[in-house]
Image (spheres, rainbow, N blue to C red):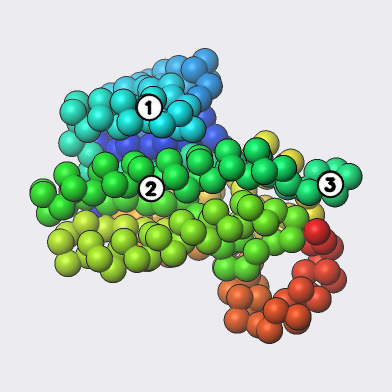
Amino acid sequence: MKSPKVIFLTGATGAIGGALARLYAQPEITLILQGRNQLHLQSLADECRNQGAVVAIYSCDLRDSSALNAFINTVQNEFVIDLAILSHGVNINHGSLNKGETWAEAEALFDINVRATMAIVHSLVPHMRARGAGQVALMSSLAAYYGLPVTPSYSASKAALKTYGEAMRAWLAPEGVEVNVIMPGYVKSEMCDAMPGPKPFLLTPARAAQKIQKGLRSNQPRISFPFPLNLGCWLLSISHPSVAQRILGWLSYHG
């Protein structure tokens, strides 16, 4: 959708989510913003209103199934959504002492990154199919191409979203519903700062948001960036695993 008027954005209190909200905020635009940090969410809403947008905010923990269902139903009853950008997500790693991820951390990560995303999509899609219009964007990552040893659960969750989004796109395209998979590289944020290993071609959230908006307007199947890192990750995915593992070792992406 080249000119969406009602935009639903999860993870709005994150770096990319906040940058997207600010980018889309303008007169005649309605923004529906979700985040867990109520104070940050309210501050962001005030910024967007000052730019002329109509803003509704919802502070909801997406790990809570009952709260998630109530939140989705409320949004669906009050708004006709043109564009949904599901930018929520968390990351974990093996820790500074390389102890490994705990099961509790991994389970919580999949609840947020995968289960909550799919639950929202399942709620949105019937309405969009009935109208024959709408667009849904899933926040994957370049880590979906080849799992990084430092963040195995995160990489797996983003690979799941990539595959799911691509399958949904092929299914829904004939009905006028667009589905896009967003695959950023490193974007400056607290989550990115906490991730071990090098961070080549680091982008600002504002620059990442611009690339995402451009890709959504042209309905790109994969909105993957920056180009050099995208190419490198894709090449890892088609390399023999032993070769890819050796390359990651040379680049200091150890387990």
Up-down: is 64 above or below 82?
above
Residue 23 % position (x, y): 42, 39
> Circle 1 sits in a helix, a strand or a loop, which is it?
helix
Looking at the image, the residue that sits furthest to the front is: 103
**Of the image marks 2 and 3, the number of the one nearer the N terminus:** 3
Q: Residue at x 45, y 32 (%)?
A: 62
Q: Residues within 10 Å of mark 3 (few under 14, many from 20)?
A: few
Image position, residue 146 (x, y; %): 62, 68
Check contact, mark 1 vs mark 3: CB within 8 A: no
Above or below: residue 231 compared with residue 104: below
Seen at 46% across and 61% down, the residue is 162
User: Above or below — where is 51 with respect to 252?
Assistant: above
Amino acid under label 1? Answer: Ser
Q: Quadrant of residue 8?
A: top left
Residue 118's tag is: 2
**Could you say whether the residue bearing mark 2 is in a helix, strand or loop?**
helix
Graded by Cα atoms within 10 Å as few (under 14), some (14 to 19) or many (20 or more), the crowding at tag 1 reads few
Q: Is there CB contact under 8 Å for labels 1 and 2? A: no
Q: How far apart are the two marked residues, 2 and 3, measured between alpha carbons?
A: 30 Å
Residue to which mark 1 is pinned: 66
Q: Which residue is labeled 3 in the image?
A: 99
Q: Earlier in the sequence, mark 1 or mark 3?
A: 1
Front-most of residues 189 and 218: 189
Question: Up-down: is 60 above or below 165?
Answer: above
Q: Quadrant of the C terminus?
A: bottom right
How much space separates mark 1 and mark 3, taking CA atoms?
A: 33 Å
